[in-house]
Image (spheres, coloured by chain):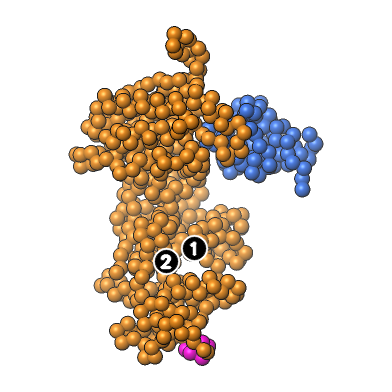
Chain colours: A blue, B orange
């Protein structure tokens, strides 16, 4: 994972979270705590988040991988690792 | 015929609403179901739909006006009206006001329908030199004139299909479509709501550069906010006070409805536990290879199972009003949605029983997003015939709902729990689901309620058939 990818993933996630959980301060979020509890995401919020990540960042998180993105830190890595090359 | 569009009642306890914004202008034609404006209520900002095809004659309550339920908001004319509605005593202005607020010109422009124009136009005849004919000679409806001016079209160029060959609004729309390259004149300012227009002016933002996201591309307050980066206060409230007010108002609305429910409705409660293992495995298989937008939500299964089951139990699907039960004609389950920051709403998901699960899922996703953004439609707030409250995939095992009057039942869906489950003499670990029913004993009895819950549980065993 390159720095630029991580930067892009971070700013992309920031935008996505701003839409779905606008009151959440991503800088203050615990990278190792359960994301859905940290950001108070219910099941519909969670799928909307997955949809937005797919649409905005081009990264599809299949349902089978939901267990790998349970914290913000894990989600950031997951997305950064799979981010398509910048066009 | 002149008619009025009234402040809708969006549920028990609503006494008034405050107009935030109109998406329509006098003279504009609207079709049944179009969103015409936004009103601030104790349930948040609600988009109001119109219930008939009509033409907007006049806006009677401007943005910022607090209007009691049942009082007029808009004066309407029938879409086919070719002339201004007869002046009524309450409406001293015989012609609809111009969109830009200028006094309408009297006399020359308004043809008397009885005597007709002196030069009878021949319908279908192309005028040879349209420019030479004064516009006032072309019979036309006020709405048509206004629209033509907006579009930069000359009335003389338009074929009239109204009485005496009068140019009507649909004629202008048709002409506008067939002339797509015509550059609009200066008169064709970008369509924007009055609030957006004022805000843009105050902020020094050029409306021409803004892409409107309102109905038919109308520029709204939010569009101006987005482009300018500035927050444009709603006409009545501001900033944090707005949030606090809103929160307090929503709590009051919930308090009123729930207190009424517990005071008046003799609830009875039933619970049933089922194995959700089969349904969840089916969901996991189905969703495995699907793109995120195609993945089916558990809530869709519950909504559909409840909708199908309740159609055989009409006494659970309807309203208790005036000491008697009125069964609903259709099944529109309301989905209880908790709002970030507190409070909840239970907007209707329409006609669930007839829709495939992926359509229900996208309807739910859209509804949740709009509920949280405060953009529900009036029909969604008023149409629910039974409520489903689901705790989602996390949370506690059991929820007993409080019936939302005048409805007569609410189905509670707990979070799935892994539990020992005995089946056919064997014990295994299953994910189980606890379903509950709170129902109005005036309208139904426990026996029927019990059969209903069993039916829902049965439907959830064969999700592939839902």
- The residue that disc 1 covers is B193
Distance in Å between CA atoms under marks 2 and 1: 16 Å
Q: Is residue B146 magenta?
A: no
Asked whether the residues under marks 2 and 1 belong to the same chain, the reply is yes
As drawn, A31 above or below B6: above
Q: Residue at coordinates 54% horizontally, 55% vertically from top-left?
A: B222
Q: Is mark 2 on a helix, strand or loop?
A: strand
Q: Residue at coordinates 36% horizontally, 27% vertically from top-left?
A: B455
Q: Residue at coordinates 44% horizontally, 47% vertically from top-left?
A: B376
Q: Residue at coordinates 49% horizontally, 26% vertically from top-left?
A: B279
Q: Looking at the rendering, which quadrant does residue B37 occupy?
A: bottom left
- The residue that disc 2 covers is B29
Most common secondary structure along the magenta stretch: helix
Estimate the x, y position of residue B338 in percent, counting from the top left.
46, 36
Q: Which of marks 2 and 1 is in front?
A: 2
Q: Nearer the viewer, residue B153 or B165?
A: B165
Q: Is residue B131 magenta?
A: yes
The earlier-in-sequence mark between 2 and 1 is 2
């Amino acid at each position: 994972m390159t720095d630029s990818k991580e930067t892009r993933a971070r700013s992309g996630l920031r935008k996505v979270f701003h839409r779905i959980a606008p009151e959440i301060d991503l800088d203050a979020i615990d990278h190792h705590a359960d994301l859905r509890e940290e950001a108070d995401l219910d099941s519909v919020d969670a799928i909307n988040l997955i949809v937005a990540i797919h649409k905005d960042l081009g990264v599809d998180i299949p349902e089978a991988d939901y267990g790998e993105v349970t914290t913000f830190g894990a989600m950031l890595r997951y997305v950064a690792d799979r981010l398509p090359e910048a066009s | 015929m002149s008619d009025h569009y009234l402040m809708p009642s969006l549920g028990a306890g609503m006494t008034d609403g405050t107009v935030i914004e109109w998406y329509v202008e006098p003279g504009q034609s609207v079709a049944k179901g179009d969103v015409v404006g936004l009103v601030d209520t104790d349930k948040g900002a609600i988009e109001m739909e119109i219930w008939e095809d009509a033409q907007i004659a006049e806006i009677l309550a401007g943005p910022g006006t607090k209007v009691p339920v049942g009082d007029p908001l808009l004066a309407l004319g029938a879409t086919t009206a070719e002339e201004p509605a007869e002046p009524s005593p309450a409406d001293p202005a015989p012609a609809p006001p111009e969109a830009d607020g200028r006094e309408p010109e009297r006399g020359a422009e308004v043809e008397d329908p009885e005597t007709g124009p002196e030069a009878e136009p021949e319908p279908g005849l192309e005028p040879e030199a349209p420019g030479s004919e004064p516009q006032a000679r072309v019979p036309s409806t006020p709405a048509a004139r206004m629209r033509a001016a907006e579009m930069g079209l000359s009335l003389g160029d338009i074929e009239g299909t109204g009485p005496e060959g009068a140019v009507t609004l649909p004629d202008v729309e048709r002409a506008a479509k067939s002339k797509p390259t015509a550059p609009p004149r200066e008169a064709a300012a970008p369509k924007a709501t009055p609030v957006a227009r004022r805000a843009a002016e105050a902020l020094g933002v050029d409306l021409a550069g803004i892409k409107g996201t309102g109905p038919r591309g109308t520029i709204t307050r939010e569009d101006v906010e987005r482009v300018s980066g500035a927050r444009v206060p709603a006409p009545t409230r501001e900033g944090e006070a707005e949030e606090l007010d809103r929160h307090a108002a929503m709590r009051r609305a919930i308090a009123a409805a729930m207190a009424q429910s517990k005071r008046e409705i003799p609830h009875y409660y039933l619970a049933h536990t089922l194995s959700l293992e089969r349904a969840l495995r089916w969901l996991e298989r189905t969703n495995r290879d699907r793109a995120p937008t195609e993945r089916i939500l558990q809530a869709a299964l519950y909504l559909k199972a409840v909708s199908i089951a309740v159609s055989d139990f009409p006494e659970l699907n309807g309203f208790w009003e005036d000491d008697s039960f009125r069964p609903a004609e259709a099944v529109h389950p309301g989905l209880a949605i908790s709002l970030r920051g507190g409070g909840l709403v239970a907007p209707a998901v329409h006609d669930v029983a007839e829709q495939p699960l992926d359509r229900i899922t996208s309807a739910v996703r859209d509804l949740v997003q709009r509920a949280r953004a405060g953009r529900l439609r009036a029909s969604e707030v008023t149409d629910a015939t039974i409520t489903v409250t689901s705790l989602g995939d996390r949370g506690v095992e059991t929820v007993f709902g409080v019936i939302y009057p005048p409805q007569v039942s609410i189905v509670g869906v707990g979070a799935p729990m892994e539990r020992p489950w005995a089946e056919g003499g064997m014990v295994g670990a299953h994910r189980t689901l606890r379903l509950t029913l709170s129902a109005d004993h005036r309208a139904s009895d426990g026996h029927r309620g019990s059969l209903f819950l069993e039916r829902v549980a049965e439907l959830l065993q064969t999700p592939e058939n839902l």
